[in-house]
Amino acid sequence: MSSVSPAAAPPTPAGPPSTGPARTTVFGVSLNIRQSGIYIAFALIVVLFTILTEGALLQPQNISNIIVQNSYILILSIGMILIIIAGHIDLSVGSVVAVTGAIAAVLMVDYGIPWPVALVLTLIAGGLIGAWQGFWIAYFGIPAFIVTLAGMLLFRALTLTVLGNQGIGPFPDPVRTLSNGFTDGYFGNIGLGVLGGADIFSLLVGVLVVGGMALSQWRTRTARLGYRQAVDPLPVFLLKIVTAAAVIMFVVVQLARFRNLPWVLVLLAVLVLAYSLVTTRAVFGRQVYAIGGNLQAAVLSGIKVKQVVFWIFVNMGVLAALAGVIFAGRLNQAGPTAGNAFELDAIAAAFIGGAAVQGGVGKVVGAITGGLIMGVINNGMSLIGSPSERVMLVKGVVLLAAVAFDVWAKRRAAR
């Protein structure tokens, strides 16, 4: 029997660690149930609420509302997934959203500082908050649960100190545009028959996104074939690309029919692309996965664990500050109750999106999908007139089911 020496073995392409070998076969197609289950569940939830709302869920204005109303949770989920992958948790992000929104309001409204300068100062303040918590967690060795729980109380108290029992507003127009505004119709509209008119610029952006996604997936497949790794059969690969492209273009067409692309969606797209590259291509992202997957092995391999943990909390603080500005701009004021329970929604989005309880597993796109699932549940149940307690019940069941599925998948893989 021939063997290949370690030196001759082909290198492994960059990307997140495998999320487990647990696979199942559906209609003759082998699927990784942990990776694919979240997208299948999302599709089923959308179909269910589309039927229950008689199509209202997928109307252009409602799709736009889902994106805008959940934008700050989606931003928080990007930072939260990194923290959970590294094996930690952050319970303070809701309070950080509130205090940074208050800081932005004081700078822009009370002191009249130009909004770009105030925005940068607010993001720096969020980074300093993250550095404060990251120091106690990474260098002092206090569990993240305790540090961020203390931070949740500390920064909420600071918010109340700054604002008292009143809000501060209104915010400058550019900040409100970032939170609630839409791109201009640069090239006019085009007729879509029975669908009416749609913004040409938005449609072109959608085509570019689909093309970039298809090219990226094709290059990844080609690289894996070069490394003699297992890949999906070509018909299955093409089916996945076509399905993803159809979903993206459907959403883009609906947005183009309403008021074009929300600016906050453009911001989210940039963040998702950037953080996906960091987690799949950058050394820092690989180190985050290594720390969450096996801390002792990460230390022995020479990874500076303390520095990595410190910087993921700094990153969380910056993203929480950005979410704070977006949320305050959407309401057009910074209020003392802003950010209540945001940490729970961000954590739920990460776990529903496929993050493992023990760390080491998760994807940025999965966290975004988990956040959208929560948003669709909120929106769909609101459209059918469900009371708030029933919405909380459903969200709790979905979160429990997601974590139970993760545990079941691990046990199945172990067997």
Image (tube, rainbow, N blue to C red):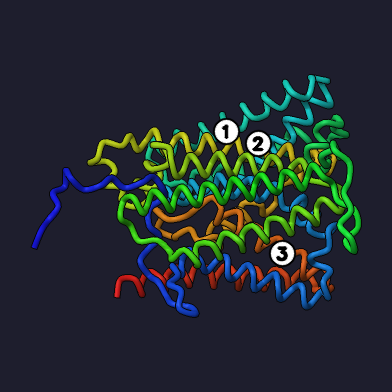
Mark positioned earlier in the residue sequence (1 or 2): 1
Mark 1 or 2: the one toward you: 2
Name the residue tied to disc 1: 129
- The answer to whether marks 3 and 2 mark residues whose Cβ atoms lie closer than 8 Å is no
Residue 299 appears in which quarter of the rendering? top left
- Residue 394, horizontal then vertical, whole percent: 67, 73
Residue 63 appears in which quarter of the rendering? bottom right
Q: Mark 1, residues whose alpha carbon is within 10 Å: few (<14), some, or many (≥20)?
A: many
Marks 1/2: CA distance?
A: 9 Å
Mark 3 or 2: the one toward you: 3
Residue 335 in view, yes or no: no
Closest to the observer, 390 or 77: 77
Name the residue tied to disc 2: 321
Element under disc 3: helix
- Residue 297, horizontal then vertical, whole percent: 25, 47
Closest to the observer, 205 or 346: 205
Mark positioned earlier in the residue sequence (3 or 2): 2
Q: Residue at image x 66%, y 52%?
A: 342
Closest to the observer, 43 or 70: 43
Q: Quadrant of the N terminus?
A: bottom left
- Residue 313, horizontal then vertical, whole percent: 50, 38
Q: Residue at image x 67%, y 25%?
A: 120
Mark 3 or 1: the one toward you: 3
213 horizontally vs 53: left or right: left
Name the residue tied to disc 3: 376
What amino acid type is highlighted by mark number 3?
Val
Q: How many marks?
A: 3
